[in-house]
Image: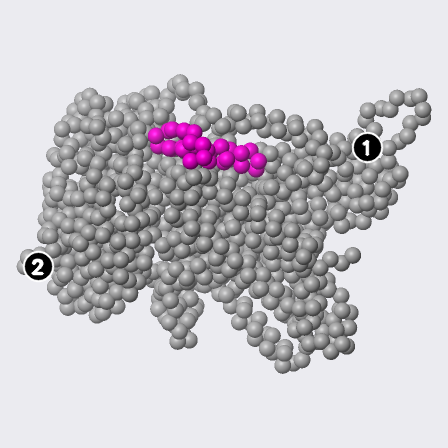
Amino acid sequence: MNRDVSRRTKLVLYGVLMVLAVPFVFPTWWMVTSSLKPVADIFAFPPKLLPVDPELDAYRRVFELQPFGQQYLNSLYIALVVTVGTLAVSALAGYAFARIRFRGQNVFFLVILAGLLIPSEVTIVPLFQMFFKLGLVDTHWPLILVPILGAPSVLATFIMRQFFISLPGELEEAARVDGLGRIATFWKIALPLSRPALGAVAIFTFLHSWNLYLEPIVFISSPDKFTLPQALTQFVDAYGGPMWNVQLAAASMTALPVLVVFVIAQKQFVEGLAHTGLKG
Amino acid sequence: MRTGKGVRGLAVALAGVLALTACGGGEEAGQDGPASLRMTIWSANEAHLKLFNEIADEYKKNNPDVASITFDPLPFENYTTTLTTQIAGGNAPDLAWVFENSAPDFVASGALLPLDDKLKKVDGYAYDDISPATTKLWQNDGKLFAYPFSTSPFGVFVNTDLLKKAGQKTPAELIAAGQWNWDNALAAAAATQSATGKAGLVIRDFDYKGWDNLSTFWTGWGAQAWSADGKSCGFAAPEMVEAMTTLHKAIFTAKALPGPGTTADFFAGDAAMTVTQISRASLLKDGGFGWDLVPLPAGPKGNYSVVGQAGIGVMKKSKNADAAADFLAFLTNPTNSAKLAQFFPPPRQSLLTAETLAKTNPKLKPEQLQKVVIDGITNGVVKPSHAGQAELSQQVRASLDPLWKADADVKAVLEGVCTKIQPLLAK
Amino acid sequence: MSQTDTRVGRVESRPALGRARPYWTTHRRDQLTGYLFIAPQLLGSAVFVILPLILVVWYSLHEWNVLAGTFDFVGGENYAALAEDTNLGSVLRATGLFSVGLVVFNLTLALLLAVLLNQRLRGTILFRTLFFSPVVVSLVAWTIVWGFLLQDNGGLNGLLDTIGVDGPNWLRGETTAMISVVVVQVFKNVGLNMVLFLAALQGVPGELYEAAEVDGASRLRQFWRITVPMISPTILLTSIITVVGSLQVFAQIAVLTQGGPGTSTTVLVYYLYQQAFQFHHFGYGATLSIVLFGIVLALTVLQWQMRKRWVHHES
């Protein structure tokens, strides 16, 4: 509803928005400020909103206790590889389902869609056995191959298909008249036009890979191969008690860079999502 | 809908792959050449690892057919789950530490290699030196399946500074007067809490989830989680009801123990007393608060002690089972047992003397070692254990949750526990 | 003759009479390209989705004792055990409560936020960023921070204390624990749905509202009669995604409550994790997986069928 609103309504709206924003912002605020406090202060009652005497000790210990830098790189490169791979697989498959007629395509599409409905907890044990037989346990291969080729990329294919369906057919007709083959049409015409959808897929896929929790825990056992979500739960003392300030420091370092990138690129982020064609 | 050739081809390919992978655990060709051994442990403590690696290095020098020995720390909280998942996935270690509460599962399963013959054959091993009280849990049909390398009794660490601040008598004084019992201990805890604001008594690792640590409390009433044969539920018995009612009052009325969701770490100076195993002495900081270590307070049924145990087992299916058992024999021989004793109280009677232990436990005084450790090991009741431990423990924990509210009906909740676990105990 | 549908068909060349047609016509080449394009995704699905699913069914027909190393065929015994499982009732109830609570709260909040941000206000971009920010924060990080805030002496109760409210022990009461996990999950992801609704709202033609104004309809009436029907395709799609997602929530429960207190937050996916990975009843865990898959499938089909009734289709 793009109409002008009265002054009073504006004030009310701002007020409501600010109240609503609190539970979204407060946890991130708390996470960062608590990571700068000594453990005793974190549970201090009444709580202090700002650290009294900020110290970076927890941050230092994060790197001492875990090969955190390596783990950061792990999460990063895995997410990048998975994103690029998924873009390739889903763009190809989405285009084919949208534009090419071939026998059995509806059946194949339904088979692929099944991937959207199966939770990863259901398939994790057989997948573990498969990778173990291939000697690929405690490597990053399961974390790369499964998202690109398996269930998580199905949503991407779905999105790309929706998008390609919504492309006007005349562009490709014109290309065909010009003598371009199917592959050339895809590469030169359809793909460049699909940038908004590709952007949305890239965002979804990156975030999904960045946040994977169960899979790294099941497949990876060496600390220097851990990914960030896995590493975050490892900051416990020798007997299992959580080291709160260290955990929160690690969590801050995990969340903040992505958040900063998001703030800078948020226009593209949000608009890419809106163009996924999920509007129906 | 036309299915077409494509789909049929897919089905054939699937069937082929299925046939290959569905045949249980794969048999891999036996390794020739030097063996690699892996032992899963739950301690990531640097000092522990240093000692293990030293012993391993010495072993490798004399045994060139063993190329490497790795100590693989798994997270403490989910240790048994992680270990069993590794085994399920076909990735079992050669040796594994086993908690006392999962001993029945491992020992009776046939997954572990029987050790006695191997150990007895080793020169100078002195198998008879092992105290029978410590091996009961790890034996089945007269054979030993895991070596109880650590038998760690529970004691009470006391922050004497806090007690003095609250004007309370220290446990040492109470012991001297023959008055060190739970009533007095809880009273002192409650008084300290209200005087100083710090927590009174913390049963470490309980946190309203690890209920088996409460056995350090209820044993004083003669209560037990289940009967010795594991078939009848002990939670609804009168002794247990009495013990839990006392505990409930101490938590919610007297506030002697911190309530659910409140954390207090004794070793950070936030509690007056804590019930934990003596190995935690390493968490005490030099130059921190004044402290003491005393045995568990007496209950209505008198003095008692409770121990936790850890065993090392060899996985029967390991490709290097023989080499693993040999290494285990070396690791636990008299010389190395003495070295390990600084962290892990051994089952060897010759080593269970105050002087020997004092050498490697500099923080503890001989009287403390005698009263808490040695007497504890000889006479202690082991923490509860049962077959099907994981599910049983979770069921108990879930059924006990209603107890941790101020208005709980203790008797009803405990009866609920028995109702829930009786079918599991019968298995 | 080429057909003017969305799939650009290829015209088959008509050969002169008497000459044999080559095998690789453009149509066949095109088909081959189609198969090649979908091959990675299809084969990947076959290996990483369908095959594990079949194996899970296979496990559910066996009793797999990991430590003893036995894998015995028991047929339908695991399925019969479902009927005798005293915990299953409360697990299904917890799952239902969680999913319904989550979907209702999530969609309502997302729509509310989208409507608020759709007003002509300065600074909506800032608020949009704030509301979306939890989506990009790591899931485990988010859950750990909340776990910490929800402790009895943690940040949330501290905040409530400053306004004189005595907060309950959030994670230790059965109802409050369920509310806590729902709220934590919703705040994490509602930004996504909000953005989708926002895009849909912006696609509603302004003339419809102007016409309604002229007719004297109130803002609320306009909302129900114009806005909701116009964005109903989006509502349906987000609700399907949110429902399916709600049945897969695992990490929050694992980190915050471990299914407790009691079994009040043990939802189906957490229960199956317990059975398979903690109690090592892999066969029974596999059976529960099949139940979960069945529920997801049924709900999705149901919602998809409902689209004919509820979704307002433009031409």
The front one of B118 and C280 is C280
- From the top left corner, tell me how far across and down residue C211 is, in percent: 77, 73
Looking at the image, the residue that sits furthest to the left is: B177
| Disc 1 packing (10 Å; few <14; some 14–19; many ≥20) | some
Vertical position of residue A214 compared to residue C261: above or below = above
Instruction: Please name the amino acid that badge 1 sits on.
Output: His
Q: Residue at x 21, y 22 (%)?
A: B117
- From the top left corner, tell me how far across and down residue C261 is, in percent: 37, 56
Magenta range is: C49-77
In the rendered image, residue B209 lying in the magenta stretch gets the answer: no
The front one of B362 and B241 is B241
In the rendered image, which residue does mark 1 sit on? C27
Q: Residue at x 63, y 77 (%)?
A: A10
How far apart are labels 2 and 1 at the CA level?
Answer: 96 Å
Q: Residue at x 36, y 54 (%)?
A: C262
- From the top left corner, tell me how far across and down residue C242 is, in percent: 57, 54
Find numbered disc 1 in the image and state the secondary structure of the residue it sits on: helix
In the rendered image, which residue does mark 2 sit on? B179
> Which quarter of the picture shows residue C108?
bottom right
| Disc 2 packing (10 Å; few <14; some 14–19; many ≥20) | some
